[in-house]
Amino acid sequence: MTTTTATELAALLERVRAGREFGPNVYSTLDVLHVLYDRVLRITPATVADPDRDRFLLSKGHAVAGYYALLAARGFVPVEWLDDQGGPASRLGDHPDRTLVPGVEIGSGSLGHGLGLGVGTALGLRAQGRSDPRVYVLLGDAELDEGANHEAIAYAGATGLANLTAIVVDNRSATHGWPGGAASRFTVNGWTAATVDGHDHDALHAALTGHDHHRPHVVVAAVTDGE
Amino acid sequence: MTMRDAFVTSAEEVLTDPRSVLVLADISAAAFAPAAARHPDRVVNVGIREQLMIGVAGGLALTGQRPIVHSYAPFLVERAYEQIKLDLDHQGVGAVLVSIGASYDRAAAGRTHLAPADVSLIDTLDGWTVHVPGHPDEVRPLLRDVVCGTDPAYLRLSTGGNASAYPEAGDLRVVRDAGPGAPLLVAVGPVLDAALHAVADLPVTVAYTHRPRPFDTAGLRALAGGEVILVEPYLAGTSTRVVSDALADRPHRLLALGVGRTELRRYGGPADHDRWHGLDAAGLRRSVDAFLGA
């Protein structure tokens, strides 16, 4: 698997940014996306419709700039698409639309939808006897405020949905916080969990590949405020 | 046999297709226990979690499965409306939603279990087929038909209903013909018998459909004269827009009858609420007489 250098990725992100200000949510998610696409996800532009591909579901759909940059870096979309993000003829909105962007598994933007869709995807793969592909859902710590997540966390844990990984980018943006840590919301329901530095690529890689194939797995990628 | 019984039996049949997956949120889970034992990966009960129920259906459909999602109407359609909008429609995938507890089927349970607005709410979305069967024998062919496809569909089951089944009445079916130019009464689903009784001695043509969406506008144009009476078992006026659009080029008068919006805060049974909403034969007759100036 070829990799994307941080410099290449920064240049692509700059094309999406086009002089605008990005919030912390963009930068806090970038390293996780980078490690996922370079070292974890078994998806290529040639396999976007392969039923045995891994699925990556971006639930926090506002973290879209780094996502589009990675999709361009990995060849899912033409790099030129980045220059007109959000424009009237653009396929790249401020939130992603799976019907417009190759490689995008779900349309997101309203928080709290990705994990339920991920549970359904994992159940569909299981019903088809596809034990190899894995479903990864990326959320934010503030997104966990949405109750729909907790419906999915409880159900996936109770039923041991082993082909599901949730990734929570924790930039401490939840208004009322998660005392005891975001991971505890998952582990109390039977998930395995790893909490790592959200900028440490090797630690992220180890955590993202640390599932035990018996239970759902959560990786909390901790980043400092504003990063 | 009730519509719900017919649904359970028919769903067990369609589950023999490995594409089908039944998604439940505890409601009717006991009735589907044998099916769950036979198809443990394709009968999914998420517990009392309606948002997850629709999200799971969306995810299943994204993998190519055909979800059949079942619960009580207010919980299936109203509680999880954003999931229906985003996890199904916005993802470009479909599911078959099957509700029980239509309008005031469980009147004694009070407002929390009443859902007369379900069809209106589904009607804010694009491309949905809505079936409102009026007899248990209509359920099986309708379910099999919609499960075969990939488009979104809503089946609204009721404890109410008519003495006769008309399984082929997706398009308007004339049940009583009063001749050319007569006022046309269109009855949707379980209100047919009350409507027939109400206009038994009036020169009114009565047509029946169990498929309000897509509404048979060609059939409507062929049958309608200058006066149309719509009788629906959910919110009054739900199909007014469709009928008005279909007849926009013709002078016509439209009377749209159905369940009122006011919260009555009364219990009793469905027959009581039929009477209070003017959907029993006597109430329908009063409205029709006033409309036709009899």
Image (cartoon, coloured by chain):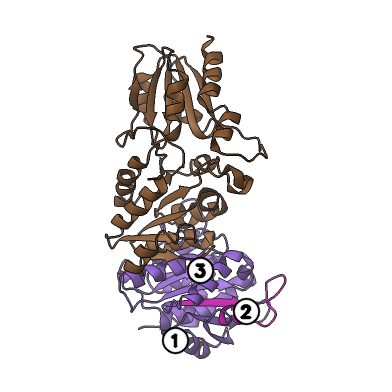
Chain colours: A purple, B brown
* In the rendered image, the vertical position of residue A23 relative to residue B186, given as above or below: below
> Label 3: which residue?
A115
- Give yes or no for residue A148 being in the magenta stretch: no
Q: In this image, B76 relative to B263: left or right?
A: left
* In the rendered image, the vertical position of residue B253 relative to residue B39, given as above or below: above
Label ID, residue A75? none
SS for callout 2? helix
Q: Is there CB contact under 8 Å for labels 2 and 1?
A: no
Label ID, residue A182? 2
Look at label 3 and name its amino acid: Leu
Q: Is there CB contact under 8 Å for labels 2 and 3?
A: no
Whole-percent x, y for residue B204 in the image:
41, 15
Q: In this image, B108 relative to A204: left or right?
A: right
Are the residues under marks 2 and 3 on the same chain?
yes
Region rendered in magenta: A165-187
Label ID, residue A209? 1
Whole-percent x, y for residue B246 in the image:
42, 25
Tell which circle, 3 or 1, labels the residue nearer the N-terminal end. Answer: 3
Residue B123 seen in the current view: yes
SS for callout 3? helix
Question: How far is disc 2 from disc 3 in space, using C-alphas?
Answer: 15 Å
Are the residues under marks 2 and 1 on the same chain?
yes
Q: Residue at x 55, y 19 (%)?
A: B287
Instruction: Classify 10 Å Cα crowding around label 2: few (below 14), some (14-19), many (20 and above).
Output: many
* In the rendered image, the vertical position of residue B108 relative to residue B273, given as above or below: below
Look at label 1 and name its amino acid: Thr
- Give yes or no for residue A174 being in the magenta stretch: yes
Question: How far is disc 2 from disc 1 in space, using C-alphas?
Answer: 19 Å
Q: Is there CB contact under 8 Å for labels 3 and 1?
A: no
Please state which of residues A206 and B145 is positioned toward the viewer in this rendering: B145
